[in-house]
Image (cartoon, rainbow, N blue to C red):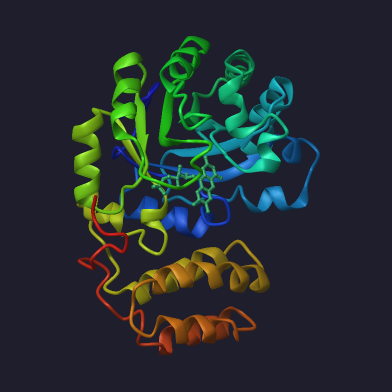
Amino acid sequence: MKIDELELKSDAVFAPIAGFSEVGLRALCAELGAGLTYTEMVSAKGLMYGNEHTEDLLHTTEYEKVRAVQLFGSDPEILARAAESRELGKFDIVDINMGCPVKKIVSNNEGSALLKNPSLASDIVRAVRRSGKPVTVKFRIGFEKNSRTGVDFARYMQDAGAAAVTVHGRTREQFYEGTADWDYIAEVVQAVDIPVIANGDVFSKEDYIKIKAHTGAAGVMIARGALGHPQIFSEITGTPCPYATVQDIALKHIDVLASFHSDIYVVNNMKKQIACYCKGLRGGKQLKLDVFKARNVAELKEIVKESAVLSVPALGQKTREGQR
Ligand SMILES: Cc1cc2nc3c(=O)[nH]c(=O)nc-3n(C[C@H](O)[C@H](O)[C@H](O)COP(=O)(O)O)c2cc1C
C-alpha cells in the first residue's frame, strides 16, 4: 500500500488510541509488522501553546518506518502551523481526527463534529497540506445513527487533497456500540480514488482477511485488537516474532517506555497496558493487583518476570473478542 510516495511495508496499520498508542506499543506493533503507526490524538492548540504533556505523546523509535501523527482541532491556521512545527518534523504523515465522538471534543467543533461541516473540514485539509506532508483524515461513517454521510465526506476530503482516508464503520452516535458497518465502508471505497483504510472490529487474522475481501479497502486499521496483543500484526503479516511469550513482549514494552519516560510515568501507564496483556488469561486479576504495588520500573519488571500469568506463548493465542 502507498500513501502518496510513501510505500508501507504492510497494509495493516496500528490505530491512534488515546491513552494507549504510546511509543512503547507503537514500537512493538511496528516491529511485529504494522506498516504504519499513529500517535494518539494530539491537540494542535496544545502543541502551539507549549502544553508540557503534548510532547510526551510525540516520541518515536526506529522500529516505526512510516510515522503518522494525529492532530485534532478546528482552526485551519492552528492545525497548519502545528503540522509545520519543528516538533512534528520526524513524522511522515499528518492525520486529522474527524471521528472522535467525545462530547467535550464535539462541542468545540472538533473530532466528529467536522462530519457536519465538510466545508471547514476541507479548509483544514487544504491548510495542513502547506506542511508538504501527505495529509490523511480519519472519520466515521456519519454523525447521527440514521444518516450516513461518509461517502460524500470522503469525496470532499479527496477533493481537498487528502492522500488517504480511514473510515471507522460506526456513526458518532454509536460511539463503540453495535458492529462496524463494513458494507458502508465498501461504498466509500467505491466512491473515491485515494486509498481507503477500513477500520472497525478486526481482532484476528481472519477478521483482517474478511474486512479486506468485504470492503476492497487498500488497508486495514486495528485498534482494540492490538491492545495487549501487538503480535496480531505478526499473525497477519507473517513478520517473525522475536518474543517467545507474552511476558517477553510486556518486558520489551516496559523497556521502550522507560527509555523515554520517568519511572512514575512508566508505572502508571503500564498498569493499564498490563491489564490488556492479562485479558482473558488465568490469574490476570492477581497480576493487575500486584502491578499496582510497583513503585518504580525495577519493581514493575520484577513483578512481571515473577508472574506466571504472562508466560504463555506469544503467538497462537485465541483472540479475546471472538470472531465476526
Ligand atoms: C480508548 C480508545 C481511545 C481512542 N482514541 C482515539 C484517538 O485518539 N484518535 C482516533 O482517531 N481514534 C481513537 N479511537 C478509535 C480507534 O482508533 C478506532 O477507530 C476504533 O476503536 C475502532 O477500531 P477497533 O474496532 O479496531 O477498535 C479510540 C478508541 C478507543 C477504544
- Residue 294: where, in percent of width, then height? 60, 84
The correct choice, above or below, for 56 with respect to 308 in the image is above
Q: Residue furthest front?
A: 146
The correct choice, above or below, for 196 with respect to 258 in the image is above
- Residue 14: where, in percent of width, then height? 41, 46
Residue 228: image quadrant is: bottom left
Q: Residue furthest bottom?
A: 306
- Residue 240: where, in percent of width, then height? 23, 58
Q: Which is nearer the eye, 204 or 43? A: 204
- Relative placement, left or right, of 128 versus 92 is right
Image quarter hosting the N terminus: top left
Q: Residue furthest top?
A: 159
Residue occupying the point 37% across, 42% down: 200
Q: Which is nearer the eye, 14 or 115? A: 115
Residue occupying the point 71% across, 35% down: 107
Residue 39: image quadrant is: top right
Q: Is residue 307 visible?
A: yes
Residue occupying the point 29% across, 74% down: 245
Number of numbered discs visible in the structure rendering: 0
The correct choice, above or below, for 316 with respect to 159 in the image is below
Q: Which is nearer the eye, 222 or 69? A: 222
- Residue 217: where, in percent of width, then height? 28, 29
Residue occupying the point 36% across, 40% down: 180
Q: Is residue 89 visible?
A: no
The correct choice, above or below, for 158 with respect to 324 in the image is above
